[in-house]
Image (tube, rainbow, N blue to C red):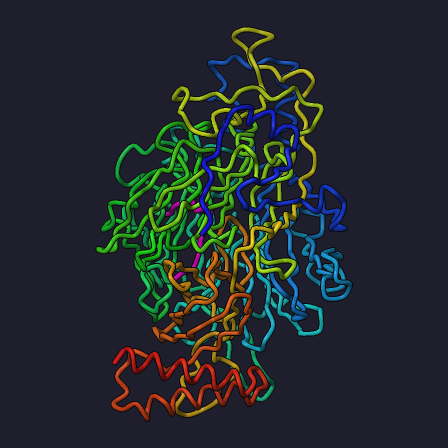
């Protein structure tokens, strides 16, 4: 593995403002945005919600009738809108099954969402064409927020779920010919027009069908009452929603049906609050279905927002909540038994991996950060301990965050951490996040280096109000790339950036020199009163950034795409209850001579977004390594001697190598029957079948 360079921070702000493109001297990699250069062919603009008119009206009125500073929180803040430009998300997926990754981006009401079809296979160049209209997924009538996807009918292509903000959700079934059909009505997944922001797919009851969970917030985004001192008593908090997939096959084919089981499956029983109902609801910004404790059953992790400080135990809403799954569709909030998770913050994004190589899954949560929220509200890494509790790790004072990802961006064999964020809050536009990339120092030490100077990014992200973040290998070079979406961008005509108000003083953090904010209201021109800055504060429509990894440090890599048994294997002795995408599987990879890293296959995470289902692992200078997979339902498989540069389909073999089959022959026959089923569907070839069979047999012998 290459040596990690400790970043220096002098003049970091100047370098970032100049859009400094790094010339890495240490063999690292950097990212180049193809949208700002015009190379991607993307002209996406994210437009505001109707709430933006409310915000502008408040500013216009303040210009005529200055607001007494003493009355500001009591009169203006409660009636100012939440996220007036919306809450956009982004997903990376291969909707047309042509072998390259496409992008779906959500938009405001009256503006179509975008389905950006990659032209890599067609032209050899990484450019995109917006085909949302032809594909039937514009969803123009709603204010779209989060997006997630998965193969809900196990027919071999990925279906799309788009969350509606105070409007119905939309479920689009992939027709397999480049188009989608809106099946919201027949599947009853429209929901109650709650203020949903994110979604995730996973198989809660291990029946081979993907279920959906939706993260909801509070009932009127035209107001910000929940952020004021009286906020914990606000009656409009909304429970999250679980749709259980009840689809079935008959003579007419697959009949799609979902059932809202939120009232009965445990998602509304928030552990430390009152009973189910509004009084016991949290305020969830991000959500993920993930096998967090690696028992073969899907759990739910919700990243919740505290908003106003709690007055008592029952008002402690802002935790990262662990809803433990039982494998039968039910979940139990066990956060009250996990003191390490009882930490208030505005948790806003979730990402997963094994940060310290101990074989247990950790997660990273973005939060308010020091510069806007103060000490204690930092984005944080939660390390899972042997007893199942978690230990919070604040790496250093850090900026505001929304979407995030844990991925090995430099392919050196350990997971790194990325997050972005910006926000119009308390009439300050937070612009403290230039794009955070924390480099894992390796050797399982759980120590990190911040890449600030030089920046790993070719653009300064601080003027971008980044919300959704997703990662995937867009150009198929083995190094993963980054897609981000903004709700709005700070207009370049606004007054120059000023140093961010630091509630705790200089922190010694590498982000001290670059954490900034944009003032919207100021008392400078009229002491004792608040008036809009001059020139007036403006926002530009949001945009996409497609940042391609330079992939030039020489490190090796492997990539895997999981395949479940459902819809593929039909054999009386082979269970067929692993969903077609393998969502919920946990992959662990050990490079030769290196530590083991871990990645779960997620049907939605980050903030309002979803990474590509294909995952990659870095090898550093190793030439090969071994893969272990824990599938939904608890089945374990191994594949030995995966060579650097291999990109492999990993089919689920529902014959766990550590199970007691009574005899080796029975296990051998189970494996053979499964692999023959995949080969009969032309999903694997004969040589690969033999390779998988040999690895399975070796794993069984070693386990017994």
Q: Decide which of 48, 442 is in the foreground and name it.
A: 442
282 falls in the magenta region: yes
Which residue extends farthest top?
Answer: 527
Q: Position of residue 353 (x, y in %)?
A: 40, 55
Among the 4 quarters of the image, the one containing residue 297: bottom left
Q: Position of residue 657 (x, y in %)?
A: 33, 79
266 falls in the magenta region: no
Determine the main secondary structure of the stretch shown in magenta.
strand
Q: Looking at the image, how many numbered discs can be counted on the residues? A: 0
Tell me: residue 50, above or below residue 687. Answer: above
Task: Say whether residue 228 is left or right of residue 26.
Answer: left
Q: Position of residue 50 (x, y in %)?
A: 65, 39
Q: Residue at x 30, y 59 (%)?
A: 332
Q: Decide which of 311, 219 is in the foreground and name it.
A: 311
Q: Residue at x 71, y 60 (%)?
A: 117
Q: Residue at x 67, y 74 (%)?
A: 176
Q: Decide which of 102, 691 is in the foreground and name it.
A: 691
Residue 12 in view in this figure:
yes
Q: Residue at x 26, y 35 (%)?
A: 312
Task: Say whether residue 694 is left or right of residue 437.
Answer: left
Q: Decide which of 277, 226 is in the foreground and name it.
A: 226
* Residue range of the region highlighted in magenta in the rendering: 281-290
Tell me: residue 324, above or below residue 223. Answer: below
Q: Position of residue 391 (x, y in %)?
A: 28, 45
Please state, as top left, top right, bottom left or bottom right, where the C terminus lies in the image. Answer: bottom left
Residue 169 in view in this figure:
no
Task: Say whether residue 396 is left or right of residue 559.
Answer: left
């Amino acid at each position: 593995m290459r040596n990690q360079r400790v970043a220096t921070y002098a003049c970091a702000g100047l370098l970032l403002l100049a859009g400094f493109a790094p010339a890495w001297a240490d063999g690292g990699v950097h990212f180049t945005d193809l949208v700002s250069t015009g190379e991607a062919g993307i002209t996406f603009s994210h437009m505001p919600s109707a709430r933006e008119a409310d915000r502008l009206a408040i500013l216009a009125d303040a210009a005529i009738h200055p607001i007494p500073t003493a009355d500001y929180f009591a009169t203006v803040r409660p009636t100012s809108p939440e996220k007036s430009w919306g809450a956009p998300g982004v997903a990376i997926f291969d909707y047309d099954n042509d072998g390259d990754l496409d992008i779906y981006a959500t938009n405001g009401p009256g503006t179509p969402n975008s389905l950006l079809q990659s032209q890599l296979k067609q032209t050899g160049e990484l450019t995109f064409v917006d085909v949302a209209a032809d594909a039937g997924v514009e969803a123009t009538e709603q204010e779209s927020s989060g997006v997630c996807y998965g193969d809900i009918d196990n027919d071999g292509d990925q279906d799309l779920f788009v969350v509606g903000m105070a409007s119905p959700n939309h479920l689009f079934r992939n027709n397999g010919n480049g188009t989608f059909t809106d099946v919201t009505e027949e599947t009853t997944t429209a929901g109650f027009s709650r203020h949903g922001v994110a979604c995730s797919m996973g198989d809660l009851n291990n029946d081979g069908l993907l279920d959906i969970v939706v993260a909801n917030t509070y009932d009127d985004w035209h107001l910000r009452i929940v952020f004021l001192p009286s906020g914990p008593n606000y009656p409009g908090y909304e429970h999250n929603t679980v749709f259980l997939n009840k689809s079935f096959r008959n003579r007419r084919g697959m009949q799609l049906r979902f059932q809202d089981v939120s009232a009965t499956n445990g998602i509304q029983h928030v552990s430390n609050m009152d009973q189910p109902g509004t009084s016991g609801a949290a305020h969830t910004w991000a959500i993920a279905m993930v096998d967090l404790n690696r028992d073969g059953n899907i759990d739910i992790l919700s990243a919740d927002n505290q908003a106003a400080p709690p007055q008592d135990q029952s008002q402690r809403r802002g935790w990262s909540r662990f809803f433990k799954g039982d494998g039968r569709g039910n979940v139990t909030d066990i956060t009250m038994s996990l003191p390490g998770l009882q930490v208030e913050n505005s948790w806003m994004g979730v990402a997963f991996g094994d940060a310290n190589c101990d074989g247990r899954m950790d997660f990273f949560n973005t939060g308010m950060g020091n510069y806007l929220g103060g000490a204690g509200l930092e984005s944080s890494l939660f390390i899972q301990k042997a007893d199942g509790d978690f230990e919070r790790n604040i790496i250093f004072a850090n900026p505001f965050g929304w979407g995030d990802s844990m991925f090995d961006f430099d392919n050196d064999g350990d997971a790194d951490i990325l997050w972005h964020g910006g926000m119009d809050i308390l009439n300050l536009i937070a612009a403290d996040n230039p794009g955070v990339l924390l480099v894992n120092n390796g050797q399982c030490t759980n120590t990190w280096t911040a890449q600030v100077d030089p920046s790993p990014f070719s653009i300064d992200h601080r003027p971008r109000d980044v919300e959704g973040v997703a990662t995937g290998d867009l150009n198929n070079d083995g190094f993963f790339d980054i897609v981000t979406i903004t709700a709005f961008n700070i207009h370049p005509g606004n007054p120059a950036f000023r140093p961010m108000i630091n509630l705790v003083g200089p922190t010694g953090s590498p982000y001290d020199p670059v954490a900034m904010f944009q003032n919207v209201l100021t008392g400078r021109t009229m002491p004792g009163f608040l008036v809009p800055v001059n020139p007036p504060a403006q926002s530009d429509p949001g945009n996409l950034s497609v940042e391609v990894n330079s992939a030039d440090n020489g490190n090796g890599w492997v990539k895997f795409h999981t395949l479940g048994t459902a819809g593929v294997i039909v054999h009386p002795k082979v269970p067929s209850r692993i969903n077609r995408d393998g969502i919920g599987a946990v992959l662990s990879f050990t490079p030769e001579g290196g530590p083991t890293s871990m990645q779960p296959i997620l049907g939605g995470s980050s903030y309002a977004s979803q990474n590509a289902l294909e995952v990659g692992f870095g090898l550093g200078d190793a030439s090969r390594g071994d893969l272990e997979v824990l599938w939904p339902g608890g089945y374990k498989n191994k594949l030995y001697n995966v060579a650097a540069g291999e990109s492999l389909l990993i089919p689920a073999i529902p014959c766990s190598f550590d199970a007691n089959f009574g005899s080796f022959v029975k296990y051998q026959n189970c494996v053979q029957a499964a692999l023959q089923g995949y080969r009969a569907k032309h999903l694997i070839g004969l040589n690969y079948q033999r390779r998988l069979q040999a690895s399975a047999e070796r794993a069984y012998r070693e386990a017994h």
